[in-house]
Amino acid sequence: MNETLPWIFPVLAVTTWTLIPVYAGLRRGRFYAIFSAIVLGLAATGGGIVFARLGDWVPEPALPGLQMAFAYGMAATSAHYASLVNARMRGPIFRGLISIPGQTFLAAGFMATFWLLGLLVPRLLLWGLGADTALRWLMPLDLLPYAVAFAAAFTSPRLSPELVRLHLGMPGPEKFQRVPMERYRRSPPAPLTTRPLRVIQIADPHLGPWQSVARLRNIVEGLVDRNPDLILLTGDFLTMESNSTAGALAEALAPLQRLPGRCFAIFGNHDHEAPDEVRAGLAANKVRLLVDDACTLETEAGPVQVVGADYVSRDRREHLEKLLNNHPRLPDHRRLLLLHDPSAFHDLTHDDAADLVFSGHTHGGQMGLVSLGLNWTVLARSRWPDHGHFAKGTNHLYVHRGTGFYGFPLRVGVPGEASLLELVWD
């Protein structure tokens, strides 16, 4: 058996990389075939290099176990991607034995490819200097992406219950930037003298392997229990699996029926892959879908106007200008704008578009130092506002870190969010 172990992983990797894209192309189409070929190829490359080097530094008694773990991870990856050709929501056994370990292993191999490229420079320098001892010290670093992916598989689904207090009504900075907010994770804040508008946002739940129907339903149940004035759902409800599973979203969002007339939603980019399923899931739970539309309601904090922008990838400035012109601000109403992609905030031309814009899409940046109390993420200097409170002039933006995530379990240092927002007008 020990003689065949070194060959099991390479054979599985090559077979997966060649046959799955072909199968996908024949049964699902060209796009998924190309996508799977790229992702599986990158993951198999990193995994193959790490696997080939295991014998150079892993103690011999531990080597067969690691080789079997790599083989199982590759087999699970292959089975998961084959299942996506006929995508649907799977039961807990399939998710636990195939989808979750497969996606975790795939994420590790994907990261390993780029991690090993980064290590190539110091290794070449040490090799040129003849520093053989230092080169041996670097060998265990090959497994770092696998350690990160394994840890992230446990931490990524975790949500952080919080109370977030945003102060609105005053002009912000002239240039777009992050602005302070109050965030309470353990002890409750001092009570306010005036009644705030209490809002729950659900962003990017991504019903799928990492977000089962039962789990999302429990999350929504807990959020509804906080009895907000509004629940705002800012899109990306499904994944490839849930797109083709009729009724899954309706069942997962069922607790929203307890708050009729208080729940409003928009489409995200992924929702346009299965718009009828999203519409049906929202309608079943009396959630009003706003597709370039607006509505008003009375709350204990006063009248509110909610404007919902559909997701578009082009001509966003013209799209938003038309939407806001068609639905002007109403006197004596708080005005909230739902906008899935926060980068579209830069396309708002109205000086007073809304008191607050609610967005998601970025999953908070996914990798960063938020868990340590710092705002930095890998998106910090990108065009996407990653998480938290931003402002430019009279327009304010709140970017939710996400109720779920899609695909790779790579929330590292950026936990998901289960917040109650208190909006205070100064």
Image: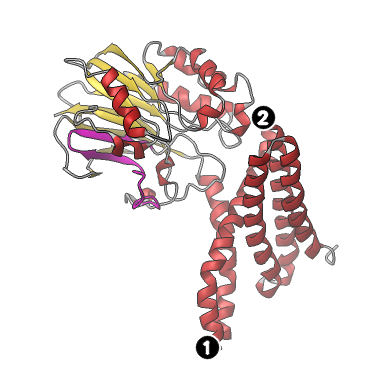
Q: CA distance from mark 1 to mark 2?
A: 54 Å
Quarter holding residue 360: top left
State the image coordinates of residue 123 (x, y, percent, origin top left).
54, 77
Lateral position of residue 301 relative to residue 337, left or right = left
Q: Is residue 23 left or right of residue 331?
A: right
User: Which residues lie in the magenta part?
Assistant: 377-400
Q: SS for tag 1?
A: helix
Q: Is residue 337 left or right of residue 192?
A: right
Q: Is residue 406 visible?
A: yes
- Which percent across, then down, holds residue 408? 56, 46
Q: Is residue 283 magenta?
A: no
**SS label for mark 2:** loop
Q: Quadrant of the C terminus?
A: top left
Mark 1 residue crowding within 10 angstroms, few (<14) / some (14–19) / many (20+): few
**324 relative to 6, above or below:** above
Q: Which mark is residue 129?
A: 1
User: Which of the image's four quarters has the N terminus?
Assistant: bottom right
Q: Look at label 1 and name its amino acid.
A: Leu
Residue located at (71% from left, 66% from top): 62
* Residue 188 visible in the current orientation: no
Observer-nearest of 311 and 331 = 311
**Snapshot quadrant of residue 386:** top left
The image's mark for residue 88 is 2
Q: Nearer the viewer, residue 321 or 159?
A: 321
- Dot 2 amino acid type: Arg
Q: Please say if 107 is above or below 259.
A: below
